[in-house]
């Protein structure tokens, strides 16, 4: 996939009123602070496209980005962040699961996993849920630049063994751009 244009489209706080033009959607999910906004910015080569933050738990909306005027990248609320109230966590968990379950336009889901913490329960639950909903998904192992060589081998082994259903696993660094071309190729192959 060659990204020639990427624009912020709209944010939604509920499933009502999502775009109705029928364009396919490639969805990005992951724990809060996994590096999702950074990955979207690096993938689209647009620094300020998605807001990045060192304060976790800030994105509680479904953010749509229009890509090549032909499809959407969808940034879902981060999960697994403990320091918010129960009520708030529930309402925004519902938004996340409701979207994944119901949205017809989903072509592919990219599950982001922090390469320093592979095999976390919440990530495994998310992948089980994606499989249960019949959603094809691949994995981006984020913050790959932070790992030593030994940690890289170990992280790959762990993820490969706990995600047999993943269509692809790409090592990704938003800082160096490693994995960008690979991920774009996988998006092309699996979002058709
Ligand atoms: N070293 C490194 N840090 C990253 C990378 N991607 C994101 N970060 C850092 O991780 C933190 C969270 O990133 P952000 O993209 O806002 O995560 P989000 O909450 O998942 O959207 C920020 O401090 C980023 O600078 C990466 O590829 N490498
Ligand atoms: Mg974010």
Image (cartoon, helix red, strand yellow):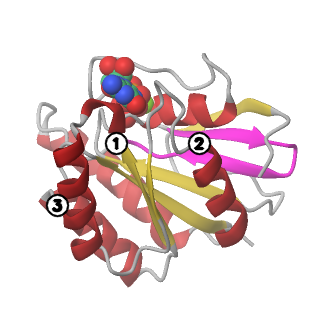
State left or right for residue 24 relative to residue 168. right
* Residue shown at 60% from the left, 53% from the top: 182
Magenta residues, dominant SS class: strand
Q: Residues within 10 Å of mark 3 (few under 14, many from 20)?
A: some
* Residue shown at 33% from the left, 80% from the top: 164
* Residue shown at 83% from the left, 33% from the top: 5
Between circles 1 and 3, the one closer to the viewer is 3
Earlier along the polypeptide chain: callout 1 or callout 3? 1
From the image, tell me which residue sits under label 3.
Answer: 119
* Residue shown at 75% from the left, 73% from the top: 192
User: Residue 188's image quarter?
Assistant: bottom right
User: Residue 157's image quarter?
Assistant: bottom left
Residue 15 makes an appearance in the image: no
Work out whether residue 99 or residue 163 is closer to the camera in this orientation and state it: 163
The magenta stretch is 62-77
From the image, tell me which residue sits under label 2.
Answer: 180
Where in the figure is residue 6, as x and y percent of width and height?
76, 33
Q: CA distance from mark 3 to mark 2?
A: 23 Å
Earlier along the polypeptide chain: callout 3 or callout 2? 3
């Amino acid at each position: 996939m060659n990204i020639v244009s990427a624009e912020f489209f709209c944010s939604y706080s509920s499933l009502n009123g999502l775009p109705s033009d029928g364009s396919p959607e490639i969805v990005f999910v992951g724990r809060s602070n996994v590096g999702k906004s950074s990955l979207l910015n690096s993938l689209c080569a647009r620094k300020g496209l998605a807001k990045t933050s060192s304060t976790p738990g800030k994105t509680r909306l479904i953010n749509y980005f229009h890509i090549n005027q032909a499809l959407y990248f969808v940034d879902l609320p981060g999960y697994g962040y403990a320091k918010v109230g129960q009520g708030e966590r529930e309402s925004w968990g519902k938004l996340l699961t409701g979207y994944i379950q119901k949205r017809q336009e989903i072509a592919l889901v990219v599950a982001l996993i922090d390469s320093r913490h592979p095999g976390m329960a919440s990530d495994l639950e998310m992948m089980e849920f994606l499989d249960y909903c019949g959603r094809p998904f691949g994995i981006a192992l984020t913050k790959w630049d932070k790992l030593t060589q030994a940690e890289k081998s170990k992280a790959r082994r762990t993820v490969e063994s706990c995600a047999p259903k993943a269509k692809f696993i790409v090592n990704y660094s938003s800082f160096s751009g490693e994995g960008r071309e690979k991920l774009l190729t996988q998006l092309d192959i699996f979002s058709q």
